[in-house]
Amino acid sequence: MATELKFISFNARGLRQARKRRQLFAYFHRRKADIIFLQETHSCLADSKYWMHEWGGGMVFCHGHTASRGVCIIFNPRLTFHIIKQELCQYGRFIILDVNIHDRIITLVCIYAPNIDTPGFFVEISRKLNDFEGETLICAGDFNFVFNLELDKTGGNPRTNFKARETCLDLMATYDLIDIWREKNPCVKNFTWSSNVTPGIHCRLDYFLVFRHVSHAVNETISSPGIQSDHSCISLTISTYSVKRGPGYWKLNNSLLSDTNYVSLINNIILSELHSNEYRDPSARWEFLKFRIRNASIKYSKEKAKEKRDKEPELLKRIANLEQVLYTDDSSAIRHQIKEAQNELLLHYNYKLQGTVIRSRARWVEEGEKNTKYFLNLEKRNKASNVIHSLKLDSGDYISSNDAILAEINKFYFSLYSSGGCNPDPFFLGLPEQCAHAVNLDSCDGELTPDECFEALKSMKNDKSPGSDGLSVNFYKMFWHLLGPIVVNSLNYGYNRGELSSEQRRGIVP
């Protein structure tokens, strides 16, 4: 199921005039906007209650001066929302909110950047964003620079606030944000601000920035003439998909292989199967052993995860208690215990961060190069990219419901892998028949040897799961001295029987 949210961003150039303010509020109601980002409101604390009454819904203010600055985020009276966290700029230039809408946390950022080159402005916003947790981020406002001098500006000198632009680009790289209008219109010239002088200067200064991984959900991004302002009004319509994820495929956490207790557990399971007198054919024995290993690994992983979840509050409580003791007994022994507990907590946090980096599939990491939020966003993006949100049919129509998407995928692969008549290319029909020499036949045919299988295993890359069982290459390499004979016997049993087991024939379509 998908619902749409419509956003508008507008530099109002002052809302203190009652007539102009009411015209704008009526305009936003007609546009049926859910959330409006306003810049240059020129509001003060005394205006808040009265303006909210005029609008009829929720408003979050960040006041500047009655003649400059000031930003505001306005919510449609019919929109149900709950503000979880907020950050307001003391100079009236930005608002950052975490808001719960439709059971999803969305980070909203309203920006009015300085019109002089101030790179520290975007550095501060980047630092503040690290404390917000939205699965979707909508950043909008007047940035007071152009990204591309050729496409986003005409007239005047070929310059902009270059330093501010560079720090904003760093922010976008850190949080994997994109200028969604330019993403949808890569070569189009468009402007959102025009000067009042002749010859005129026209620039695109107003932007919507969103996470790259939600760009597929943006249905529309347009600009329209503003009301009593030299800025245009820009809008964004985005679908908030509610896609139920399946359980996915289990994969072994390779860090368990350095856990002596886990290694001992698996060794005992394999040895018990090797010494078992219960008769099973080689293929069934291998499948049953994998079943036992998988179940034991999942159970052990859950127990370890619970231990780690419980460890953090225990360490925090221990540190708090020791600090209380320190107030009455300021001894080196107590300080040493506090230091040990803090180091243990730091190791715990580093372990959690390492898991985030691995799940984000970052290709390289250098200490201090990227902050935690960067990897969390990579993880979100990878998770989102593993879900099919919509499909385009041959007819040109789109489907977005889970049942319809699954039915279409099933239909596609059923047709793709169905047996039918084959019309070979004439090129292949004209090729001369070639037969392998007898010496090559001898090396290709026949049963596999343990050495052949082990050489093949060593050639595989670590941290990969070659089958649907979720057991990694690292796992097979570690336990090959025990597993080797069982695996080879299973493969040779399939060769002699003329058919591998169902699991050995199964593949995963990425």
Image (cartoon, rainbow, N blue to C red):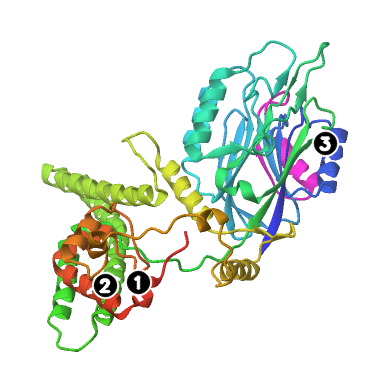
Front: mark 1 or 3: 1
Q: Is residue 352 left or right of residue 2?
A: left
Q: Earlier in the sequence, mark 1 or mark 3?
A: 3
Q: Are marks 1 and 3 in contact (CB under 8 Å)?
A: no
The magenta span reads 46-69
Q: Is residue 205 visible?
A: yes
- Nearer-N-terminus badge (1/2): 2
The reply to whether the C-beta atoms of the residues labelled 1 and 2 are less than 8 Å apart is: yes
Q: Amino acid at mark 1?
A: Gln
Give the mark toward the camera: 1 or 2: 2
Disc 1: which residue? 504
Q: What residue sits right under mark 2 in the picture?
A: 491
Percent position of residue 251, x then y: 35, 63
**Circle 3 residue:** 21
Q: Nearer the viewer, residue 41 or 220?
A: 220
Give the distance between the C-alpha atoms of the residues marked 1 and 2, in whole angstroms. 9 Å
Q: Earlier in the sequence, mark 3 or mark 2?
A: 3
Element marked by disc 3: helix
Camera-side residue of 294 and 413: 413
Q: CA distance from mark 1 to mark 3?
A: 69 Å
Per the rendering, the mark at residue 228 is none
Q: For marks 3 and 2, give the one nearer the viewer.
A: 2
Amino acid beneath label 3: Arg
Classify the position of the N terminus by image quarter.
bottom right
Examine the structure image and report whether residue 470 is included in the region drawn in magenta.
Answer: no
The picture places residue 158, in percent across and down from the top left corner, at 66, 13
Rendered residue at 39%/52% (across/down):
359
Q: Rate crowding at label 3 as few (under 14), some (14 to 19) or many (20 or more) other CA atoms within 10 Å.
A: some
Question: In the image, what residue occupies the spot 42% across and 44% down?
Answer: 375
Locate residue 399, reporting x and y percent.
69, 62
